[in-house]
Image (cartoon, grey):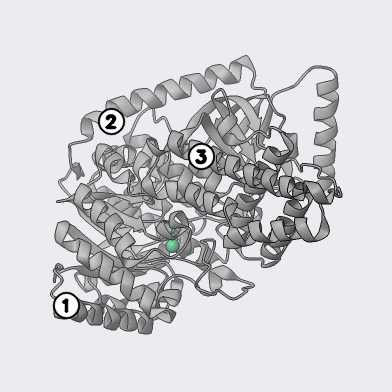
């Protein structure tokens, strides 16, 4: 629960006093588990200090020199970003490099450059003052748009502004890239560009003040294997640069100034975890088979194409969810059919002959959309999102379907549409799918005629009306993140209500049960691909409920497989029956934790959260 304001006040006093007395007691700050893993090190607080800019009148004869000085600062800034790009290119994905390109474009923005030069000439003002003023106007208008994508851009543009001003004024600002020793990085909010830099840097762990467990920063951090704690919110001010810290991304907490005892405990935990990973590695090539021979397909959720190899290394039998909208984010806009075709083909080829399910763009909600001319929305998660955008912009939708279908010749591809709330959307999408297939055939472009078409069940109305939907699609995939958000009316990205976000809530499970039973009645396969599918506590339950496959973040696959290989399908079936009769999340969690401790000894991950 959040601390009340006066409690914060007291805590702040306590910490300040203790600093004065040179005594820093251990302090545990509870946040939200963003990406698993434990990190220990020094805290580096990423600040965007406002560079003070003075207004100066330039003598007429100096104006050309002032413009030259400005041009040089721009070139130096571009050169710096390019150096960053060179340094990180080998370590990160092609797509993430696109974010750096977007920063280069922002520095090189001809419109801004020309306006700055014109104003220097007209008003005879110094370059830093004019540049700062014009960029601030851009930032203000983006900030006022109240759109998450624009807010993300604001952070990139602020970073670019600081870089250009630093170069103009000869000031050195600390950026993530300048972290010289491995550190745990804290920031109020992180932009996409910063996350791309993190991938190549000295970053052991990440902390942010805002964001929920299924926000896109959490998903990216998971992809990049960076332990992350989000949403520490009103306790952020307790962090101090250089402090010793342990970050526990499994339990979603950070420990400031840990005692010797705590350090020992965590080093034991890490040892246990790495031993367990080593032990589980022997199962990598083995199937996810229950003790009585029931097979579950274990698939990976991925955000970046570079993750396919990692997924296969962790024993994935395919990709159950490729969140294609991250392309939009890494390309800094809607990618063309050709750009998409290149990425999809690479993914499909590297996974082949294993299957890949490509989900069409799930834009909107907390996921950035610009050229879609998205209107201001009071409730973006209930607004213009996912399949709603695709159907409203059929040309973009067709380009994506074409790119996916064209990639189908390189392996085994399925298409899945997100956030279906009404069967009419499925019918409309299927019509467009057929149209695209006809167009490709007419153009004699090869594709796999058997490409499967499925839907995500992640809105309660789709679960409740699953029967007629199951009649017209090839498969279901249950998205427990959104199913939780929409069933419980809890914004998945809002740290303030995160305590209410419970995917093991009886109401969420009952809706999932309806969808699974409906898939069985219509003999179509059903998978679960929300974060719950990667939670070891839920594995036996989901298997017992009848999921044919589980699709989860790569790092959880060995743990889930181990559980599947230790449970009996008949028992799991009875367990699911019992769980579905319970009436609170606490009862369900306790019941599942007791069951799991009974079949597996010495688990390295926490069961009761
Ligand atoms: C989900 O909602 O559970 C899901 C898998 O999709 P996303 O997290 O990308 O919304
Ligand atoms: Mg979803």
The numbered mark, 3 or 1, whose residue comes first in the sequence reads 3
Ligand 2 resides in the quarter of the picture at bottom left
Left-right relation of 367 to 537: right
Left-right relation of 255 to 571: right
Q: Secondary structure at mark 1?
A: loop
Residue at which label 1 appears: 443
The numbered mark, 2 or 1, whose residue comes first in the sequence reads 2
The numbered mark, 3 or 2, whose residue comes first in the sequence reads 3
Mark nearest the camera among 2 and 1 is: 1
Mark 3 to mark 1 CA distance (whole Å): 42 Å
Q: Residues within 10 Å of mark 3 (few under 14, many from 20)?
A: many
Residue at which label 2 appears: 280
- Residue at image x 79%, y 50%? 129
Give the answer, above or below, for where 447 lies relative to 346: below
Residue 197 image label: 3
Residue 173 image label: none
Q: Residues within 10 Å of mark 2 (few under 14, many from 20)?
A: some
């Amino acid at each position: 629960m959040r601390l009340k304001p006066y409690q914060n006040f007291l805590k702040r006093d306590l910490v300040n006093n203790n600093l004065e007395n040179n005594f820093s007691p251990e302090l545990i700050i509870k946040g939200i588990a963003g990406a698993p893993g434990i990190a220990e090190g020094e805290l580096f607080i990423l600040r965007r200090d406002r560079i003070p800019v003075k207004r100066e009148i330039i003598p007429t004869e100096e104006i050309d020199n002032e413009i030259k000085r400005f041009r040089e600062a721009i070139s130096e800034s571009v050169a710096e970003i390019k150096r960053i790009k060179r340094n990180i290119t080998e370590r990160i994905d092609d797509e993430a490099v696109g974010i750096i390109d977007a920063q280069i474009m922002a520095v090189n923005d001809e419109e801004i450059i020309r306006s700055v030069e014109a104003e220097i000439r007209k008003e005879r003002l110094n370059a830093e003052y004019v540049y700062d003023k014009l960029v601030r106007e851009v930032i203000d208008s983006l900030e006022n748009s109240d759109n998450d994508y624009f807010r993300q851009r604001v952070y990139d543009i602020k970073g670019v502004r600081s870089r250009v001003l630093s170069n103009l004024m000869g000031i050195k600002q600390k950026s993530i890239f300048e972290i010289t020793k491995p550190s745990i990085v804290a920031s109020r909010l992180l932009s996409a560009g910063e996350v791309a830099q993190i991938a190549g840097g000295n970053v052991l762990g990440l902390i942010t003040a805002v964001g929920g467990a299924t926000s896109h920063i959490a998903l990216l951090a998971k992809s990049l294997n960076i332990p992350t704690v989000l949403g520490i919110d009103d306790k952020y001010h307790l962090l101090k640069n250089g402090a010793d810290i342990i970050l526990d991304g499994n339990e979603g907490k950070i420990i400031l100034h840990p005692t010797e005892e705590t350090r020992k405990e965590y080093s034991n935990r890490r040892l246990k975890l790495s031993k367990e990973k080593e032990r589980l590695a022997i199962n990598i090539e083995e199937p996810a088979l229950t003790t009585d021979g029931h097979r579950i397909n274990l698939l990976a959720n991925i955000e970046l194409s570079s993750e396919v190899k990692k997924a296969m290394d962790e024993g994935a039998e395919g990709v159950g969810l490729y969140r294609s909208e991250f392309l939009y984010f890494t390309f800094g806009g809607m990618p063309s059919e050709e750009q998409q075709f290149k990425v999809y083909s690479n993914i499909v080829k590297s996974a082949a002959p294993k299957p890949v399910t490509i989900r069409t763009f799930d834009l909107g909600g907390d996921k950035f959309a610009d050229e879609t001319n998205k209107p201001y929305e009071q409730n973006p998660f209930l607004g213009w999102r996912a399949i709603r955008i695709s159907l409203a912009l059929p040309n973009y939708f067709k380009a994506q379907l074409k790119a996916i279908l064209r990639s189908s010749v390189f392996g085994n591809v399925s298409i899945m549409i997100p956030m279906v709330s009404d069967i009419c959307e499925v019918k409309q999408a299927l019509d467009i799918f057929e149209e695209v297939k006809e167009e490709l055939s007419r153009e004699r472009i090869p594709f796999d005629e058997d490409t499967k078409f499925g839907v995500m069940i992640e809105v309660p109305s789709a679960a409740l009306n699953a029967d007629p939907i199951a009649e017209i699609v090839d498969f279901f995939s249950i998205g427990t993140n959104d199913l939780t958000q929409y069933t419980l009316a809890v914004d998945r990205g809002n740290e303030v209500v995160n305590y209410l976000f419970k995917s093991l809530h009886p109401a969420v499970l009952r809706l999932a049960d309806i969808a699974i039973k409906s898939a069985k009645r219509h003999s179509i396969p059903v998978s679960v691909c929300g974060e719950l599918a990667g939670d070891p506590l839920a594995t036996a339950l989901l298997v017992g409920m009848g999921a044919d496959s589980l699709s989860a973040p790569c790092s959880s696959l060995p743990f889930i497989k181990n559980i599947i290989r230790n449970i009996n399908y008949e028992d799991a079936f009875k367990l699911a029956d019992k769980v579905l009769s319970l009436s609170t999340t606490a009862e369900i969690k306790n019941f599942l934790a007791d069951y799991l401790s009974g079949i597996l000894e010495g688990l390295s991950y926490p069961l009761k959260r």
